[in-house]
Image: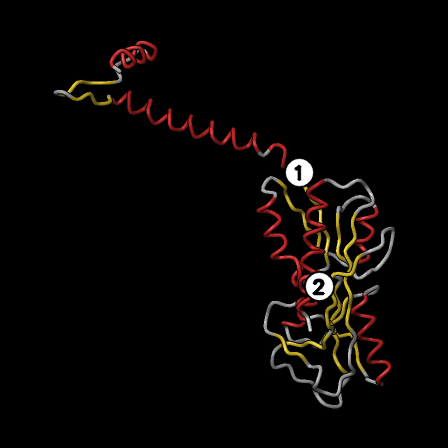
Amino acid sequence: MTQQMQSLEKIVGTPLFVTRGRRRELTEAGQTLLRHSHEIVSLCKQAMSASGLSQNTGVIKLGAPLEIANDLLPEIIQSFVERWPGVRVVLAVERSGILMKMLEEGALDLTLSTWRSGSTEGTRVRMLSVHWIAAKGWQHRPNEPLPLVVTDAPSMFRRIALSALDLDGWTYFEKFTSRTPAGIRFGIEAGIGITARTKSAFRSDIEILDTKLGLPSLPHVSYYLHRSLHKNRPEVEDLYGMILERAAKDAAVTP
């Protein structure tokens, strides 16, 4: 050990140890060298770890409308990133029509959509109920047109709301419109009016008005999973399978 210490001091060119009785202690230079050696070992470990992940890196691009992203994806994405720690997930939250176009153009690997078919044939993974929704405590003023919070055209939820009210003979006006689900959420939280949407599109307290005011009933909406027609990488196929597996399990326990 003494010979190794001496060799190390010769290489460094400065004393690294000092003798105190029977003990040898590090000099200030020795402590500095020890600290740097720990840093070097740590960097080596990081480099080896990164090298080990080099076969498990990349980007996966997934699309989903807001309401189905909130309802279905959180636990799936959590499991996926644990299984593929080197893969970066990019999530595009948009309307179904936009997402389907992105998929066709190769900007997405997978997408959830209300469209059953396009350039690809989708697999149904979820069916969500559409409700009349307003802010907690919202009150409709009698004898006044029903104030609506709706997305601008073209929009499936807009079409559902207006068609139901027209068929039922309701008087209404579009008091607040937005292109995005975030804008609709803002309009509802601000108490501006009511909308036709799924509960999963909202995180704050809302009120379901289905049995109030005599509003017409609304349909269910189906969501389909599509994947790119291009040859998909293993991580894409894995996420595709995970979504289908989760959907099948949920369907099995749904009454």
Q: What element carries label 1?
A: strand
Q: Say if 9 sits above or below 79 in the image.
A: above
Estimate the x, y position of residue 142 in percent, counting from the top left.
Answer: 72, 90
Q: How many marks?
A: 2
Residue contact at pointers 2 and 1, CB within 8 angstroms? no
Residue at 60% over, 47% down? 81
Q: Residue furthest bottom?
A: 143
Badge 2: residue crowd in 10 Å (few <14, some 14–19, many ≥20) = many
Residue at x 63%, y 41% (from the top left corner): 87
- Front residue of this view, candidates 101 and 242: 242
Which residue bears the numbered disc 1?
Answer: 58
Foreground of the two, 74 or 123: 123
Question: Measured along the vertical axis of the image, is residue 58 above or below residue 223?
Answer: above
Q: Which amino acid does label 1 sit on?
A: Gly
* Quadrant into which the C terminus falls: bottom right
Q: Which of labels 2 and 1 is toward the front?
A: 1
Q: Residue 181 carries which label?
A: 2
- Give the image location of residue 48, x and y in percent: 52, 29
Image quadrant in which you'd find residue 213: bottom right
* Spot occupied by residue 144 in the image (x, y as percentages of width and height): 75, 86
| Sequence-first tag of 2 and 1 | 1
Say which quadrant the N terminus sits in: top left
The residue shown at (86%, 57%) is 117
Residue at horizontal 70 percent and vertical 60 percent from the top:
247
Q: Locate residue 84: give its quadrant.
A: top right
